[in-house]
Amino acid sequence: MEPGNTACHGCGATLSMRYVLKALGKNTVVSVPASCWAVIPGAMPNRTLDVPMVYTPFAATGASISGLREALDQQGKEDYNVVGFAGDGGTSDIGLQSLSGAMERGHNVFYIMYDNEGYMNTGVQRSGSTPYGAVTTTTPLGRDRNFKKQPKKMVADLMLAQKVPYVATATVAYPEDMIRKLENAKKVKGPKFIQILSPCPTGWYYSPEKTVEVSRLAVQTHMFPLYEFVNGTLKLSKPPQPMEVKRYLQVQNRFSHLTDEEIEEVQSAVDRRWTELLELEEHSRKM
Ligand SMILES: Cc1ncc(C[n+]2csc(CCOP(=O)(O)OP(=O)(O)O)c2C)c(N)n1
């Protein structure tokens, strides 16, 4: 990534791209659907990325990286990394069939979902990946307290269920962890899926200098557990002193309306998922 782009201050998605390319290097082709990342490079002749980048229709990232991979292989360029870099709307909603198909066909590709938990480029609409409790412009609080009532659809968990050969979660507060995961993923010949929590000050309503803090709190409170699934084994990162989810929720204004009871509901759901992940880790070790 070159200096200069049109992202908002404190953009987590920009850090995500920077670390992904740092890990994968020059021999990389990136396919980007409609999203913030479709505008971050700016208008021609600006480009920000120092690697080839293909713009693809919103729903088509999986199909696009399948085609790029096969075409590069035909040209004998097997050493090129092919990366789909899509937002959570483009992944958990409109692009889900395309993603699932690409993973099922077994192409040797990376699919990176940068998860800012909403359709941010078009003005902070809710997506399937927006967590319970969040206010967005399509789940406004208003008199009826219309905040998002559905839980987050966790695409990495869907990819685990699909038995994609390499699945991981990562976030920008832990760049070494993210880069190590990409390096491990590189060793797997086949489809790889990584979901990167990429905090968004504009849509999560916190001040831009707090992006890394928010990202770190997501992990420390178990809101966004970090794991790596490779060769059938799941490895979960366990923060030494887990914190209450309240600590994560209170630094973002999208959750500021939640009552103590609603925060308790979030805590219970987070605890349940953490237990399930521990069980999955234990179970995968015995297999
Ligand atoms: C088929 C289609 N529908 C709608 C749009 C408009 N659109 C462009 S970007 C975008 C939001 C993308 O959200 P997400 O994938 O979460 O990425 P983010 O903007 O958050 O980076 C939408 C709805 C489009 N370009 N194509």
Image: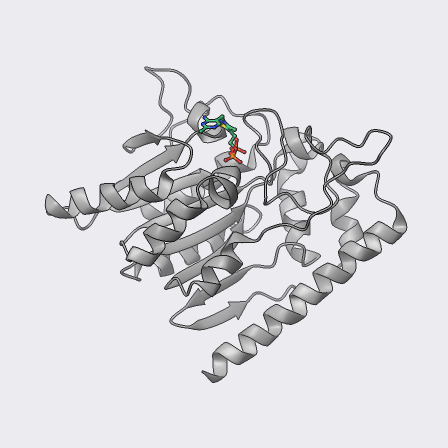
Residue 57 location (% of width, % of height): 37, 30
Q: Residue at x 57, y 53 (%)?
A: 154
Q: Residue at x 63, y 70 (%)?
A: 276
Q: Quadrant of residue 203?
A: top right
153, 52: nearer the viewer: 153
Q: Quadrant of residue 38?
A: top left
Q: Is residue 67 left or right of residue 265?
A: left
273, 10: nearer the viewer: 273
How was this image coloured?
A: one colour
User: Is 204 above or below relative to 109?
Assistant: above
Q: Identify the residue at the far bottom of this view.
A: 286
Residue 174 location (% of width, % of height): 54, 51
User: Is 1 above or below relative to 276?
Assistant: above
Q: Quadrant of the N terminus?
A: top left
25, 151: nearer the viewer: 151
Total marks in image: 0
Q: Quadrant of the C terminus?
A: bottom left
92, 68: nearer the viewer: 92
Q: Is residue 173 visible?
A: yes
Residue 193 location (% of width, % of height): 41, 54
Q: Residue at x 44, y 60 (%)?
A: 167
Q: Is residue 96 left or right of residue 259?
A: left
Q: Residue at x 51, y 45 (%)?
A: 92
Q: Is residue 244 visible?
A: no
Q: Quadrant of residue 271?
A: bottom right
